[in-house]
Image: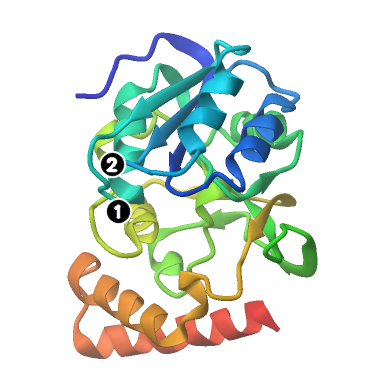
Amino acid sequence: MSRAITSETKVSIIVPVYKAEAFIGETIEQVQKQSYSDFELILVLDSSNDRSEDIIREKAADDQRIKLICKEQNEGAAAARNTGIDAAEGRYIAFLDADDIWDPCKLEKELAFMKENNAGFVFTAYEFGDENAKPTGKVVHVPKTLAYKQALSRTIIFTSTVLMDRRVIPDELIHMPIIESEDTATWWRILKSGITAYGLDEVLVVYRRPVKSLSSNKLKAVKRIWGLYRNIAELSAVSSVFYLVAWGLRATLRRL
């Protein structure tokens, strides 16, 4: 059961944490440096047996905005995010993966953009980084608006760039299904409900992309997106092929 919203200005930042001891200290520090300070940082430890918990507790001792939730069993990023959503008290939900980097003005600029466009779902451009989060110069630009059918041909919404207004989007739509590519499935479900996503074409996030990352396995990526077309979007085989080709072309161009 999701908690009631107790603050109309607070952003609840949800971070799933699993074997993230090499990154989590930096992740917390970059959030603490945000120019928009009315947030709660909900770190959901997904039964990780490294030093992540110790690092988080050290940081939380000096900052009451940091909240740690420890899960007894490892259930994956989607379930961890859902646990965070259920604990969230803020009006706004932001997702951040434990190894990605935010610009210090990310929340401030995104909230302003959301209000300017009277939007409930916004996302931003981002830049690929190497395993050390050093920007590579490869930037993914985003359109001003994105509707459901447009989203089917591109996986352009990156999880760590998203901000949502719970007054516009109910928690049951924000909750992620326990499947592969759960984030894309969630965006599609929200957009299919008639909500339009608004893109702020400014790089406010660096996507740390290790050489052996999940997304680097092209065959697995194709299988995941095919599964989404058939099982989540419930498209016919012909329509699925059409969108898969469009998706593949856009994904290739994005990485050039």
Name the residue rendered at 56%, 31% in the picture.
55
Q: Is residue 136 left or right of residue 39?
A: right
> Badges 2 and 1: C-beta atoms under 8 Å apart?
yes
Residue 151 screen position, x and y as percent: 44, 65
Q: Earlier in the sequence, mark 2 or mark 1?
A: 2
Residue bearing mark 2 = 173
Q: Considering depth in this image, is 165 or 175 the residue closer to the camera?
A: 175
On the image, which quarter does residue 180 sit in? bottom left
237 to 128, vertically: above or below = below
Quadrant containing the N terminus is top left
Tell me if residue 86 comes above or below residue 89 in the rendering.
Answer: below
Which residue is identified by label 1?
Answer: 189
- In the depicted view, which residue is nearer to us: 55 or 181? 55
Q: In whole angstroms, how far apart are the C-alphas of marks 2 and 1?
A: 7 Å
* Viewer-proximal residue among 53 and 186: 53
- Image position, residue 46 (x, y; %): 34, 41
